[in-house]
Amino acid sequence: MSGCPFVFVEDVAVGVEGVDEVGVEAVGELLGVGPADSFDEVLLDIGYKSEGVIPARELSIRNDVDPHELVSIGDEIEALVLTKEDKEGRLLLSKKRAQYERAWGTIEKIKEADGMVEGPVIEVVKGGLIVDIGLRGFLPASLVELRRVRDLQPYVGQTLEAKIIELDKNRNNVVLSRRAWLEQTQSEVRSEFLN
């Protein structure tokens, strides 16, 4: 498989009849990963009239990630149907959006239960951090610690716990607060100490 610019997937667990409907999820097993320098899409053999294609930008919520870090031979890949046919007659799919749809349900339940989320910091953006919680959660710089932090770069790669303080699916907006989690943790420790 060396020199091949694709990730090939076969054995999809969706009937051909339902595959061409937008929003349907398809599942397949990874057969190989092409070199990162020429990687631009993932191919799925779904038994449809043509292959299903996942463009590289639809593979992960992380920007500029090496596909070799995301998928390995033998992995099962789930993808959501985006379009019945592109200009080349192929079915367009998205692994990122399938993950996004599953994550929203989980995140909404955690918010309702006033729970915490945990995930790695994947990048520094203007005004804060992006945390991978199954989707891109924004952690404002003012809410990273109990006091404002100037240099956020050391947090990249660290796994943080945070409370969800704002959720808006229509705007794809998840705002997190680590400070709220730290304050709650401090309060619990104080209560245990005083009892």
Image: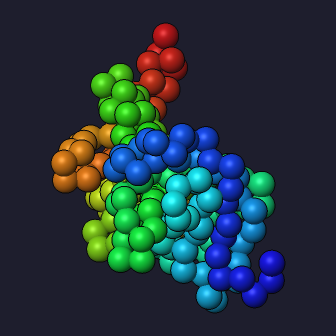
Vertical comparison of 191 with 37: above or below: above
Determine if residue 152 is in view.
Answer: no
Residue drawn at 68 percent across, 49 percent down: 11
Q: Position of residue 103 (x, y in %)?
A: 43, 42
Q: Position of residue 102 (x, y in %)?
A: 44, 40
Between 49 and 166, which is closer to the camera in this rendering?
49
Query: Which residue lies at the image location 54% right of the left edge and 40% below the top edge?
Result: 15
Compared with 125, 82 (above or below) is: above
Hey, which quadrant is residue 191 in on the image? top left
The quarter in which the N terminus is drawn is bottom right
State the residue in front, 133 or 139: 133
As drawn, the residue found furthest toward the right would be 1
Residue depicted at x 59% and y 61%: 44
The answer to whether residue 43 of the structure is visible from this angle is: yes
Tell me: 83 left or right of 91. Answer: left
111 or 71, which is in the foreground? 71
Residue occupying image coordinates x 72% and y 83%? 4
* Place of residue 93 in the rendered image (x, y in percent of width and height, measured from the top left): 45, 60
Relative to 126, does residue 166 appear above or below in the rendering? above
